[in-house]
Amino acid sequence: TRSTRPQRMLKAVQKNATKGSPESVISAIDYFCKHSEWAMNVGDEKGSILDSVVTEVNPSTVLELGTYCGYSTVRIARLLSPGTKFITLEFNPANVTVARQIIAHAGLQDKVTVVEGSSGDLIPQMKERFGITTFDFIFLDHWKDRYLPDIKLFEECGLLRKGSVLLADNVICPGAPEYLEYVRNSPRYENRYYPAHLEYTKVEDGLEKSVFLG
Ligand SMILES: Cc1cc(-c2n[nH]c(CCNC(=O)c3cc(-c4ccc(F)cc4)cc(O)c3O)n2)ccn1
Ligand SMILES: [Mg+2]
């Protein structure tokens, strides 16, 4: 049967990227998405903003929602200090398989744990299953209608501390209007919007950074 887009992306990484080089994996995926097939990776423009925020926060605990093929997972993991606890959640089991192979090609398999499942089920399990107390950095890049319920879940589960940084992809396209309204009207968050474009296109999109004030 016909291969899937993530499987074709993995083949492109295995063919074109140097094993053990995160930068070459990132470049190979961006090349594939620009010249072969569009795919919903955060991309190079928004990826550079992600890089700058991760570097600024220098987190000890990281959660990514929405692994997809592991592109942003590789971008984040390559910047983390040794000993950082990094967990990424992916709903689609076929994508989990592809992501683990792309992350391994980058040589970053020991830096991150890829967990299959839905955010609503897994967030309440973070403390008991992974020994997390709070997250220093959270990258929201999963189903856009889950951004709002999941930030409320983080608050309810006591997974945020004063200074925790949340960075949300796609707040314009596909959009997360209820999430934006919540964080921008809540006295408990300090927000900054980073204008950009939908990955590999000229369509308007952006990232919203929200710092939890406790
Ligand atoms: C509930 C739950 C869910 C998950 C989960 N795992 N994997 C994902 C991926 C979600 N990502 C997207 O849907 C997404 C879509 C577009 C897009 C698509 C089509 C267009 F025309 C324009 C833009 C662009 C993007 O940048 C995106 O990130 N979610 C993991 C855990 N729990
Ligand atoms: Mg996204």
Image: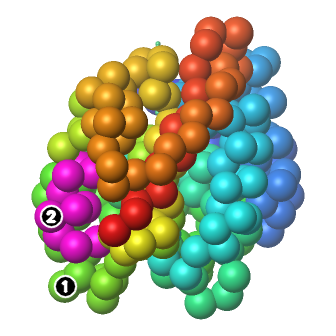
Check the picture and name the quadrant holding the C terminus. Answer: bottom left
- Is residue 188 toward the left or the right of residue 141 in the image? left
Q: Give the image quadrant in which the ligand numbered 1 is located.
A: top left
When asked about the image quadrant of residue 104, the answer is bottom right
- x and y percentages locating residue 193 in the rendered image: 58, 34
User: Is residue 192 among the parts visible in the rendering?
Assistant: yes
177 lies left or right of 158: right
Q: Name the residue under label 2.
A: 156
Badge nearest the viewer, 1 or 2: 2
Decide which of tag 1 and tag 2 comes sooner along the chain.
1
Q: What residue type is labelled 1?
A: Glu
Instruction: Give yes or no for residue 155 being in the magenta stretch.
Output: yes
Could you tell me what secondary structure mostly forms the magenta stretch?
helix
- The residue sitting at 80% across, 30% down in the picture is 31
Q: In this view, does 50 lie to the left or right of 157?
A: right
The amino acid type of the residue labelled 2 equals Glu
Q: Where is residue 18 in the image (x, y as percent from the top left)?
A: 85, 58
Q: Does residue 13 belong to the magenta stretch? A: no
Say above or below: 99 vs 46. below
Where is residue 2 shown, x and y percent of the image?
45, 23
Residue 177 x/y as whole percent:
33, 23
Residue stretch rendered in magenta on the structure: 150-159
Say which residue label 1 marks. 128
In the rendered image, the vertical position of residue 73 relative to residue 61, given as above or below: above
